[in-house]
Amino acid sequence: MNRNFTSKLLIVFIFFIVSFTIYILSSNHLDNKVNDTFVKILSNIQNKKTSDTVVLVVIDDKSLNKIPWPWRKDLFTDIFYFLEKEAGAKSIVFQNLIVFPDTYNPKSDDIFFKNLKNHYNLINSYILLNSNVAGDVLPQEYVPIFENKSNIKIINKTKKKLIPSYKAIIKLPKDLLLNTKFLASSIIPEDNDEIVRNYMPVVYFNGKFFPSIALSAYSMYTGNNTFILYDNYLCSADNCLSLKMPIFYTKGKDYIGNNVFSFISYLNWYKPTSDYYSHKTYSAGDVLVSYYAIKSGKKPKIDPAIFKDKIVIVGLNADKNVWDQLSETQILKKQADIDVHATMIDNMLNNKFKTKNNNDYTIFITLIFCLFIVRGFRNFKNNLLFTTLLSLIYFSYYLYEYFIYIYVPPITPVITMYTVAFLKNIYSIITTDKTTEMLKHAMGKYVSKDVMKKVVSDIDKLKLGGVRAVVTILFVDIRNFTQISEALSPQEVSSILNEYFSTIEPIIGKYHGIVNKYMGDGLLAVFGEPIKNSQHAINAIKCGIEITEKIKHLREKLIEEGKPIINIGIGVNTGEVFAGNIGTEERLEYTVIGDNVNLAYRIEAYNQILKTQFLISESTYEFVKDHVEVVKLSQVSIKGKSKPIDIYEVLSIK
């Protein structure tokens, strides 16, 4: 497989994994937080209030001041009797679980259980479990009795593959199970961040669907007792005219934090009227006082007419020595569970629900944005991404407020888009750096690596021109190489030259010089520019001495290989030159120009005449005389010079 194709495939795979991870995290957390903000803002702006149809009777601190907890069960019988017989409530929901027998007042249990038969509009609650713990669950022989305690029929027309999350029913007293008319689920699901945003209108257990408290109370109030469950809706049997509830099959948490799969509906919240409630509440203690007042012929504290034809939910929410039943919701840090049930009942009565677009839309819009970034939007700007984010938030808010509370997640597409843009930038930087390094490596074969580094580091100032500078020029040449090469093949000539230059070039770099150019079998090196170094003269001398030593070893190697013997000559001169870029705007060359460059070349030529190997000019000697052992040679006439000059043969470093 093509290596380039494999690299691109790997990059695409990494893009996908990272983007998908960001998508999951964002859609499960950030978008939920934005949705919470919308709900809080609109619950105050729109001032949505609950209907008067649903009211709460709460066993609160005020009630416990009158009668300490735990209460005898016959007290609940008195509350139910008052609400049904005296007040004429149409539906009564008892949300407090009756699990344990009253060992101190067993007679009160008998009174409570026997009187359950007389309440035809009372709905008791239960909780399903997704684990079967011996002793804590309803025995299997009682399950058929439990299944007959529903007041509604649910026709299953969903095509989804259902996962049986619930395995057992929390243990209920046998007498309660036998005598109560109706049972309904009181489960309130939480999202992964432990915030209640949804409601579970039906529960799936033992291959059948059973109603929640809200659906059971709604059915009892309206008379609709048959519902149809589709993939995306729970409808009344009258072609969804009375009720059409959007639902989603998803994973949530049950009341003890276990993961469960279930059908949920998004709650359409109302403006809170107190710390824990959005619905009208009455103290259970006042209800009892009112009942006892009526029995004794006195005026009740609470007028029974308040509850006539209402749905009344009776439940517990007190701080004094009892377990408070509170949940964190989108509108309150602590909201009473009975108020959450009441909220869904109100949603059903109004047939007005909040919904959320399906994930297909979010995935589609996210992919479009990401393709826009990767393919069509090469130079994205942060302000444009920010504008996109604000636009999506406004669009989402507008839909939520004016179109039946449809929530379109705005954060996930933009967060994912930011991630893809970031990954694209990283990829561009990596590939650009890689390309630059490859280019530098390739160009370094044609020009000095040091010149290349200077060009890359100062590329914005790359132009024709240069500077006047005092530098040291070193010229090295092979003696009589033209004659040697005539007896060799081109491949052999190339091999010897390559080995020769490969030997001396690293030495030049070691002493901070640059190879300015190759001249056949000769090489011109510069010390002092463009790499600034005040010790350029002595560095050039050290470089020349090391070159002569290395060439000795190379010569021995060539002899062993049966190749021609090579000898070199080195000439060094120090002086002012022009150093910089020459050529055209389209093609530049960094070089040094001047008489002092030519002088180094001509000094080197005297090696052959004087039978020496390493000569330096008088000007170079003045720079290094305290550091080198030399032999002064007679003055020589140099072409282009009007007067003879002194030259020196370098022997060693002092």
Image (cartoon, grey):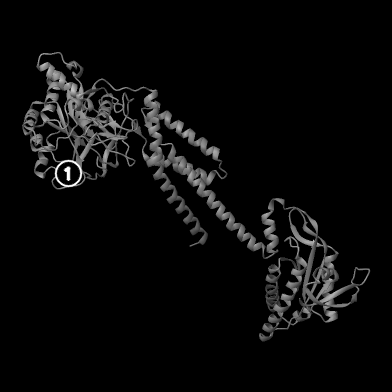
Residue at image x 39%, y 45%? 24
The one of 189 and 437 positioned closer to us in this rendering: 189
Report which quarter residue 31 is drawn in. Answer: top left
Looking at the rendered structure, the kind of residue marked 1 is Ala
Please say if 120 is above or below 127. above
Does residue 519 appear in this view? Answer: no
Q: Helix or strand or loop: what does disc 1 sit on?
A: strand
Q: Residue 542, how many percent across, how many down?
A: 74, 72
Residue position marked by numbered label 1 in the rendering: 168
Q: Residue 187, how many percent across, how many down?
A: 23, 37
Label 1: how many Cα within 10 Å (few below 14, some 14–19, many 20+) = many
Q: Residue 59, how many percent across, how many down?
A: 20, 28
| Left or right for 440, reference 407 | right
Residue at image x 20%, y 43%? 129
The one of 483 and 306 positioned closer to us in this rendering: 306
| Left or right for 166, reference 628 | left
